[in-house]
């Protein structure tokens, strides 16, 4: 049989180049679509932290209508405003999870006293355990937490926890609390320049 | 040489990769809490197994024997990544829900198993059918498990509410251990049924044999 070393090496090279080329082509052709999907996912996340539930169809128009952006010390800030004025601010965050970094958005009320929403856009926590931080019941717990009570320990004055952790995912739950605390201390605090 | 119909019977029912060979259990435990995720996972595996079996069979005489497993993995990985890219482009929601599991199709033993056990020695069309039906057999078990888990755990089927009497949903069903219990039960039922049938066949053969002598 054709089993010489040269044949083997050439075969591996040809096979590797061929299959990589197929994948590279698929990736290049579909990249604009994937990028658009990712941009939409970011927009949907921002609308979610503002408490707006978009349908896929009016995501763009809702975003255009209500959300504007500004920069504070180089930090991208999203502003949710309607006729009555500014309702919420949202800032992006990145922090260390258990296995990789966790990305997302945190929204606060216009007077910066209350957390109004939390959403993750990218996380690589343990599937089925830590990744459950992405479930609605967990994220909804953060809406309406008074920042004065929350920072830095997420227990109110009576010592009762404000947020239930995910069972079996202590590290991921703690990581989220840590990230939210850091985001409030380092990023939300900078928004004070936006206060009237 | 087997026909397509025989392959179908064998791979979906008689020699189901999950129930009989206990392959693909890891992804089974992970994704079966929702019917929709299970369906996409099953289709992804079916696509990958069928295409990679076909390709491997097509070039089986060219592949140098001592590096055949490397080449098999290369081919399998290519199809899985292709499937992942297609999901990201056309079904971003599902892609997000399945997360890392799509990439993990590569490590699903069913694909490599079919490549080594069948595609390596049989012509392309049969290898394609073999992979296809092995994947469909896996999908069948996934959907059966997911049916029970989603119905009891969320009170829904494919996201549609079936919880008309308002029973308390069963949280354990949503978590991976439930799939473990359910699959174990399914394997037990299938094996028990086959054992019973086997015994019946044996005793009827003996009876038949006795009658011949008379």
Image (cartoon, coloured by chain):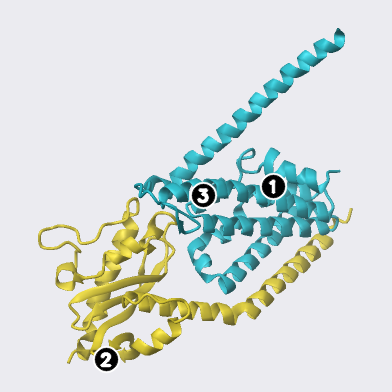
> Does A130 appear above or below A179?
above
Task: Please tell me how crowded label 2 is: few (under 14), some (14-19), or many (20+) other residues with Cα within 10 Å.
Answer: few
Quarter holding the N terminus of chain B is: top right
Q: Of marks 3 and 1, which one's residue comes earlier in the chain? A: 1
Residue labelled with disc 3: B146
For the question of whether residue B63 can be seen, the reply is: no
For the question of whether residue A114 can be seen, the reply is: yes
Q: Position of residue A139 (x, y in %)?
A: 32, 65
What number is the disc on residue B113? 1
Give the residue at x 67% y 63%.
Answer: B79
Give the residue at x 86% y 12%.
Answer: B212
Dot 3: what SS? helix
What number is the disc on residue B179? none
Q: Residue furthest left?
A: A158
Q: Which chain is in yellow here?
A: A
Q: Position of residue A29 (x, y in %)?
A: 65, 80
Find residue B196 and report its image quarter: top right
Q: Which chain is in cyan here?
A: B
Total number of numbered labels? 3
Find residue B75 and report its image quarter: bottom right
Q: Residue furthest top?
A: B214
Task: Please tell me how crowded label 3 is: few (under 14), some (14-19), or many (20+) other residues with Cα within 10 Å.
Answer: many
What number is the disc on residue A83? 2
> Does B68 appear above or below B200?
below
Residue B111 vs residue A90: left or right?
right
On what subunit does the disc labeled 1 rest?
B
């Amino acid at each position: 049989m054709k089993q010489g070393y040269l044949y083997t090496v050439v075969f591996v090279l040809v096979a590797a180049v061929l299959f990589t080329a197929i994948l590279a082509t698929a990736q290049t052709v579909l990249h604009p679509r994937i990028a658009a999907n990712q941009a939409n996912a970011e927009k949907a996340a921002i609308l979610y932290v503002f408490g707006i539930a978009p349908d896929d169809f009016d995501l763009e128009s809702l975003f255009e209508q209500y959300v504007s952006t500004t920069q504070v010390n180089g930090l991208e800030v999203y502003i949710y405003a309607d006729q009555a004025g500014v309702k919420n601010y949202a800032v992006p965050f990145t922090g260390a999870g258990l296995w990789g970094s966790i990305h997302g958005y945190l929204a606060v009320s216009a007077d910066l006293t209350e957390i109004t929403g939390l959403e993750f856009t990218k996380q690589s926590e343990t599937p089925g355990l830590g990744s459950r931080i992405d479930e609605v019941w967990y994220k909804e717990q953060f809406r309406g937490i008074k920042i004065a009570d929350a920072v830095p320990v997420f227990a109110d004055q009576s010592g009762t926890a404000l947020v239930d952790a995910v069972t079996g995912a202590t590290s991921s739950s703690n990581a989220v609390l840590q990230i939210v605390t850091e985001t409030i201390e380092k990023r939300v605090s900078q928004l004070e320049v936006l206060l009237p | 040489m087997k026909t397509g119909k025989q392959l179908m019977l064998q791979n979906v029912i008689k020699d189901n990769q999950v129930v009989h060979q206990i392959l693909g259990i890891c992804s089974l435990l992970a994704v079966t809490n929702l019917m929709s995720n299970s369906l996409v996972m099953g289709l992804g595996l079916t696509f990958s197994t069928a295409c990679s079996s076909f390709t491997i069979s097509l070039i089986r005489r060219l592949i140098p024997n001592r590096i055949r497993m490397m080449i098999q993995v290369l081919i399998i990985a290519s199809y899985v990544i292709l499937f992942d890219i297609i999901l990201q482009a056309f079904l971003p929601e599902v892609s997000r829900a399945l997360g890392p599991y799509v990439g993990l199709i590569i490590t699903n033993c069913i694909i490599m198993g079919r490549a080594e056990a069948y595609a390596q020695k049989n012509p392309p069309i049969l290898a394609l059918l073999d992979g296809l039906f092995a994947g469909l057999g896996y999908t069948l078990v996934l959907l059966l498990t997911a049916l029970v888990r989603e119905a009891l755990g969320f009170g829904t089927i494919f996201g549609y509410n079936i919880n008309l009497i308002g029973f308390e949903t069963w949280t354990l069903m949503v978590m991976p251990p439930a799939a473990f219990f359910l699959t174990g039960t399914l394997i037990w039922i299938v094996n028990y049924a086959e054992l019973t049938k086997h015994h019946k066949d044996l005793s009827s053969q003996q009876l038949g044999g006795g009658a011949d002598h008379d």
